[in-house]
Image (cartoon, helix red, strand yellow):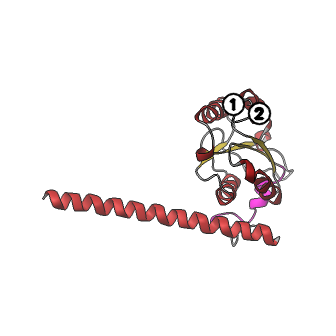
Amino acid sequence: MRQQARLDALQAHNQALARQLEAARSELESAENLLEALESGDEPGPAGLHGCPADCAAALANRCILYVGGRQSLISRYRQIAERLGARLIHHDGGSEETLSRLPDLIHGADAVLCPTDRISHNAYYHVKSHCKRVGKPCLFYKGGGVSGFAFAMARLSRGESSLGAEPPAPAASGGRWDEA
C-alpha cells in the first residue's frame, strides 16, 4: 500500500516535471523564432512567436519599458529587440552601481516594467514590486535574464500579461500610452 502511494506520488511528480520541460521548450522555441524574425527583418507575428498576436509590434509601439536588472553585457541587445518591436527601453541596473532612489522616477516615467528575477538583487526586487504595486504600474517578473528570456517577456507584455499592477489595456489607435487609456 505504501509503495503504491509512493509510486503514484513519483509518477505525478514526473508528469509535473514533463509539463515544465515542455513549457520551457515551447518558450525557448518561441523566443528563438521571434529573435530569428527580428534579425531577418520580418515582422514578428503568429509565425514568429507562439501565442503572440499578429500585432505584437503594434501593441508595444511608442511604449516606454523600464528594464530593471539583467545582464549589463546584453543591454544593447535588449534595446535592439525593443526598438524592433517599436518600444523604447530604459534600463536601471538594479542597484549594483545605480542608486535605488532613482527607481520611483523611472517607474513613474515608464509604461511598464520588466524585471528578470534571476538577475536582480532582493532589495531592488522589493523596491520595484512595492512601487509598481503602489502606483498600479504593470510589472512583469520573469526568470531568464538572457536574450531569449527578454524576447519572450516582451511578447508576454505585448499580450497584456503582468505579474502585478494595472493590466495594460490594448493600445489606442492614436498610439496613446497604456497609462492614458
Assign a secondary structure to mark 2. Answer: helix
Q: Is residue 53 magenta?
A: yes
* Residue 4 image position (x, y, % from top left): 18, 62
The tag on residue 108 is 2
Image quadrant of residue 9? bottom left
The tag on residue 76 is none
Q: Earlier in the sequence, mark 2 or mark 1?
A: 2
Tell me the crowding category of disc 1: few under 14, some 14 to 19, or many 20 or more residues within 10 angstroms, Cα based. few
Q: Which residues are magenta?
A: 50-62
Q: Nearer the viewer, residue 86 or 67?
A: 67
State the CA–CA distance, disc 2 to disc 1: 8 Å
Which image quarter holds the N terminus?
bottom left
Image quadrant of residue 108? top right
* Majority secondary structure in the magenta region: loop
The three-letter amino acid code for the residue at tag 1 is: Val
Q: Nearer the viewer, residue 1 or 60?
A: 1
Compared to residue 3, the image places residue 73 above or below, namely above
Residue placed under numbered mark 1 in the picture: 135
Which residue does the image show at 61% across and 40% down from the upper left? Answer: 164
The three-letter amino acid code for the residue at tag 2 is: His
